[in-house]
Amino acid sequence: MLCGKLSAGVPAVITSLQGNLLEIHEWVGLIATAIVILHWLWSVADSVDGGSLRALFPWGARGRQNVIEDLMVLRRIRLPLRDHGEPGLAGLIHGLGLLCVSAMAVTGSIIFFLLGPEGFQWPAMITLLDLHAFISAFVWVYWLAHVGIALLHWLAGHEVIRLIFNPRRTGE
């Protein structure tokens, strides 16, 4: 929200509370960026044996077919459920979410490391702030939908919540 106000022409004078919140935002963002980088490294390493990236981005024939099948299940107002790591709609949604979060992490990191003590020195920085704010809308929609769908699966009796928090993922 601060980004939108700054790019809309409001002076870049902020209160101490806003400054503290911005600093917390920056540190949380840097920690989130580190987590996103680790997730990408883990996904690439897991893909050596044909795993994670194929599930996150099901562009192969089998993955596309699974996505279509999952969409057909949704048409019948039922929740599709696949084995962990099998390509399908859930993996595709996770992959798109990872791309959005990655784009937000990249734009936020660029802003953090290029923003000088005098504030926004280049017009391109305002554009980057606007892009960062624009992407954040998609990330919020993704997180809210992600939690909502997980709760729907839980209400339907699927064990997805337990599998999310179980480090030894049974059924693999």
Image (tube, grey):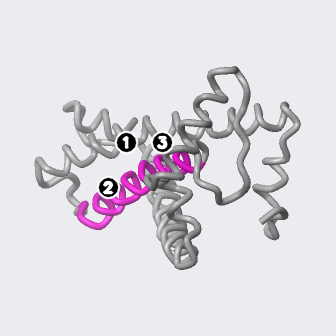
Describe the element under mark 2 as helix, strand or loop. Answer: helix
Checking the image for residue 107, the label placed there is 2
Checking the image for residue 135, the label placed there is 1
Q: Which residue is mark 3?
A: 139
Callout 3–callout 1 Cβ contact below 8 Å: yes
| Residue range highlighted in magenta | 91-115
> In front of the other: label 2 or label 3?
3
- Quadrant of the rendering where the C terminus is positioned: bottom right
The mark nearer the N terminus, 1 or 2, is 2
Residue found 33% across the figure and 62% down from its top: 112
* Residue type at tag 1: Ile
Describe the element under mark 1 as helix, strand or loop. Answer: helix
Residue placed furthest toward the right: 157
Q: Residues within 10 Å of mark 1 (few under 14, many from 20)?
A: some
Q: Is residue 27 left or right of residue 66?
A: left
C-alpha distance separating marks 2 and 3:
13 Å
* Residue type at tag 3: Val
Callout 2–callout 3 Cβ contact below 8 Å: no
Q: Is residue 162 left or right of residue 147?
A: right
